[in-house]
Amino acid sequence: MMNSPKKIVSLRAPANVDLKRNPAFAGRSNPQRGFLLLDIELSMQGVYHVYILTNKYNTVLYTGVTSDVYIRVLEHREKVNPGFTSKYNVHKLVYYEGFEDVNKAIAREKQIKAGSRQKKIDLINSMNPNWEDLWEKDFSNES
């Protein structure tokens, strides 16, 4: 079987974050700017995730799509980008599902966003009835 084509993507991440846990990239420090410059090798046929985040009190819901749920949730946690999740401290991963096709992932994200709050709650409860932080449980121990 042939390996899928790869591409290298560069990304900036806060220097105070231990990103060495994720084997997908090798970082070099850039201390004068407080960021790590990362070169990430991505499979062109990678897995895409639709995810739902909430805050500490489970009162706010945010739905997104990403090609790397580990890094994306890390960005939410570190408030790399200003916006809704930074403002309302939304970084607890309570739901995610994977797709091989980015178009299917985007369509699913739109479907979830179009649903009522109760439908989102029911979806979370079906996978994660205790609303545990799945990033801590499933991803934070990557090495």
Image (cartoon, rainbow, N blue to C red):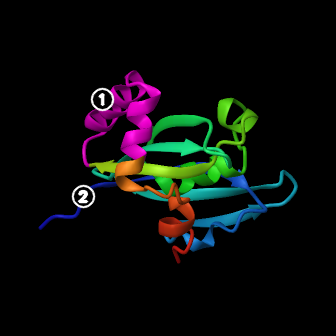
Q: Is residue 110 magenta?
A: yes
Q: Which residues are magenta?
A: 100-124
Q: Which mark is residue 4?
A: 2
**Where is residue 47 shown, x and y percent of the image?**
33, 52
Mark 1 residue type: Ala
Q: Foreground: 53 or 21?
A: 53
Image: 69 above or below 122 = below
- Report the residue marked by disc 1: 107
Q: Foreground: 79 or 124?
A: 124
Binning the other alpha carbons within 10 Å of mark 1 as few (below 14), some (14 to 19) or many (20 upward) gives few
Mark 2 residue type: Ser
Q: Foreground: 16 or 91?
A: 91
Check the image and name the residue furthest to the right: 32
**Where is residue 101 shown, x and y percent of the image?**
25, 42
Residue positioned 48% across, 35% down in the render: 63
Answer with left or right where residue 47 lies relative to residue 16.
Answer: left
Label 1, secondary structure: give it: helix
- Dominant secondary structure, magenta: helix
Residue positioned 11% across, 68% down in the render: 1
